[in-house]
Image (cartoon, rainbow, N blue to C red):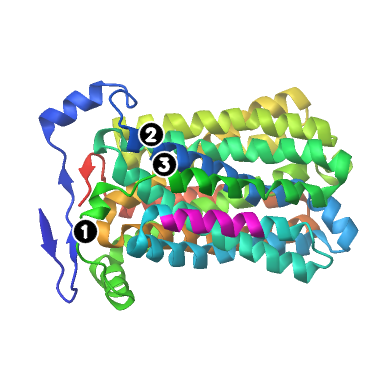
Amino acid sequence: MIENTPGTSAPSAKIVPADQASGATLAKRAWWRGATSPQWHAFSSAYLGWMLDVMDLMLFAMVIKYISHDLNFSISAAGGVVSATLLTTAIGGIFFGFLADRIGRTKSMMISILCYSVGTLLCGLSTSLGMLMLFRVIVGLGIGGQWSAGSALVSETWPAEHRGKVMAWVQSAFAAGYALAAIVAAVVVPIGGWRWVFVVGFLPALLTLYVRRHVKEPEIWSQQTQRITVRETVRLLFLGHGRSVLCATAFTTFSMCGYWGLFTWIPTYLSTPIANGGSGLDIIKSTVWIVIMQVGAALGYITFGYLADKIGRKRAFVLFFVCSALTVPLFVAVKTPLLLMLVGIVVSYFGTGFYSGFAPTFAELFPTTIRATAQGFVYNVSRAISALSPALIGFLASQYSIQSGLLVTSVFFILAAIVVLMFIPETKGSELH
């Protein structure tokens, strides 16, 4: 059932449970059985787009110490570059989200991929901190748009019974992208230096050829006869669904502050000498550790999706946030390399796995007319606000120790759990409208 929201010219979505009989049948089947060609193409394009945009996003974190040395800026300034990148993802997410609601998910996705690919290439040409900041802003715009379009595309293409699991597998591309960034840096830096790392980051642009040829618009979007204006979108978003926007943005912001504050600085923490509060690993050991750590992240992404489809979104979120808060202090206390790696896998499992719940939860909270815009707004505004976290951790690292900064992330995870527990409705099994 769809109800009209007073004061708006477009319908808003009321959460409607899926058909019990068909839902029970589909839920018993593996999510990939019976999937159609359009569903697989949507899955593949979103997975690859997400993996490669995370790679481009994290390349900077992998080569911070080389760039800062060559361009002569401080660790605090490096945190500012990261924050600026995350900040502009909000603008990109909102813009490309609205674009996806107007011209289609696939077209918006292609433009966003080109945006972050070109921005990454330009980073390799930087000769000053200002130029680097500008080019990373371009990267941020495209990365924000990729998530907005891709998450709407997959959520609208796959059935409600498997939405959490499918998006979990797509989200696991984050781990693959993070690991790929570490591998690219480890291989390319010794050969050609940090500039060539960003040249490799241009290769995702080739993905647009696949998207253009194979990926179709979701049927639910194509059947929409009305494309609402900017004014109508804003009214429906903030008046018709204001509470959902506020609550979703709050818990997403806190969780992302925890994530970005922790994982932006983990590569630096690993390579910092023990005498300065770090782990003292060289670049090869750090890279191996980061890649192995992403195994934990991938498992976290995937199992979160299955868990969310089984016990509900709320319980899954609270469980992962609380466990993240508890494992961070243990991580910074460990010094033995092998034990550090084992604890790191657990930290990565809980500290990143919850990302799988964002897309299906947001999709189930908002109607098709504004879904991509709403998802883009909530996710990327949260990411923009969380841009303060890397800068905060960088400041604490320079004033006290990097360990002290990392410990602050536990507080953010606890705050996220509280917001979900008190204010987020359970949307498991909801059909999209």
- The label number, if any, that marks residue 224 in the structure image: 1
Quadrant position of residue 285? top right
Quadrant position of residue 71? bottom right
Disc 3 packing (10 Å; few <14; some 14–19; many ≥20): some
Callout 1 amino acid: Gln
CA–CA distance in space, label 1 to label 2: 22 Å
**Residue 290: x percent and y percent?**
69, 34
Residue that appears at 81% across and 44% down: 277
Callout 2 amino acid: Trp
**Residue 318: x percent and y percent?**
40, 41
Tag 3, which secondary structure? helix
Tag 1, which secondary structure? loop
Q: Nearer the viewer, mark 3 or mark 2?
A: 3
**Relative vertical location of residue 392 with respect to residue 294 in this rendering, above or below:** below
The answer to which of marks 1 and 2 sits earlier in the sequence is 2
Left or right: 356, with 298 as reference point: left
Residue that appears at 22% across and 26% down: 26
Magenta residues (range):
107-118
Quadrant position of residue 6? bottom left
**Residue 385: x percent and y percent?**
54, 64
Q: Is the residue under label 2 in contact with that under label 1 (CB below 8 Å)?
A: no
> In the image shown, does 193 or 169 lie closer to the viewer?
193
The answer to which of marks 3 and 2 sits earlier in the sequence is 2
Residue annotated with mark 2: 40
- The label number, if any, that marks residue 214 in the structure image: 3
CA–CA distance in space, label 3 to label 2: 10 Å
